[in-house]
Amino acid sequence: MDFCRTVIHVVQPGDTYYRLAQRYQTTVPDIIMRNPGVNPYNLQVGTRLRICSGQTENPLQKDEMDLNNDMREVWAQHGFWGTLYLLSLYYALPNAEAVLERLQESPKHIAEVFGKFYSQEMVNQLTSLLQEHVQLGGELMKALRDGETEQAKQKEAEWRKNADRIARMLSSANPDYSYEELAQMLQLHLDLMKRQMLSDLQNQYQEFVNATDENNAHLMKLADVLTKGLIRQFYRS
C-alpha cells in the first residue's frame, strides 16, 4: 500500500520533476514511473501528471517518509538498470558492460537502506543474495537469448530459489514481515522480468512495455511493504 495519496498535477511554466518531487514530498524516479508516456526532459505546460504525494491527512513522521523514499528509489533504480541491461544485452549495444556494472551496484544500495537498522552481518548476507539475484537474472537473459532451453530452465529454477531465500532471510530478521507475502511479491517480480525478456525476444514490443510498467509499479509496492515492516519494528513497536 502506498504511503501517499495520488494527485493530478497540471504542469505549469517552470515546473521540473525535481521541483515537483520536493513540492509533493516524493521522488523523481517515482514520478517518472507513474508517468511513462511523459518525457521528463521536455515537460509541456498543461501536461497532466499522476503523482503519489507524501502530503497526507495523517502524514508519516519525516524520518519515516525519508525511509519510504529511500526504499522506493533503490528499488526503482534496480528495475530501471535491469531493464536497460536487458535491452543492451539483446541488441548487443556497446554500453552493455557499463550498464551491467551499474546494475551490479543495486544490491549494495538496497542493502544499505536496511543497514540503518540491522547488523553488518545481515547487510552482507542481503547484499550477497541480491547480487546472486542480479547474476542469475543476467544468466537467464543470456540463455533465453541464445535459445539454450535447458540452461534457461536451470537458471530460472536457481533464480526462484534465490528469491525464496531472500524472503526467508528478511522475514526471519523482522517479525513484522510475512514470509508468504514477501515470497509471493518477489516471485511476481521474477514473473514480470521474465515477461520482459520473452516479449522483447519475440518482438512483442507492446507486451514488453506493459510488462515493464507492471514491474516498475510492483517494485514500488514491494518497497512500501518493506518500509512498513521496518516502521512497525523500529519506529512504532
Image (tube, helix red, strand yellow):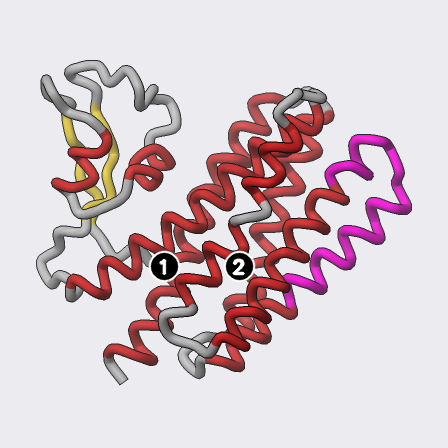
As shown in the figure, which amino acid type bears the numbered disc 1?
A: Asp
Which residue appears at 44% of the width and 80% of the height?
A: 174
Highlighted magenta segment, given as a residue range: 141-164
Q: Is residue 26 left or right of residue 102?
A: left
Which residue appears at 57% of the width and 63% of the height?
A: 127
Quadrant containing the N terminus is bottom left
Res 166 quadrant in image: bottom right
Quadrant containing the C terminus is bottom left
**Residue 168 lies in the magenta-colored region:** no
Q: Is residue 218 above or below residue 99?
A: below
Residue 124 placed where, x, y %?
56, 69
Q: Is residue 5 left or right of residue 223?
A: left
Residue 195 placed where, x, y %?
64, 38
Q: CA distance from mark 2 to mark 1?
A: 12 Å
Q: Is residue 12 above or below residue 147?
A: above
Which residue appears at 34% of the width and 36% of the height?
A: 34
Q: Main secondary structure of the magenta part?
A: helix
- Local crowd at mark 1 within 10 Å, few (<14), some, or many (≥20)? many
Which residue appears at 44% of the width and 83% of the height?
A: 175
Residue position for label 1? 224
Please tell me whether mark 2 sits on a helix, a strand or a loop.
helix
Identify which residue, 131 or 79, lies in the foreground: 131
**Residue 149 lies in the magenta-colored region:** yes
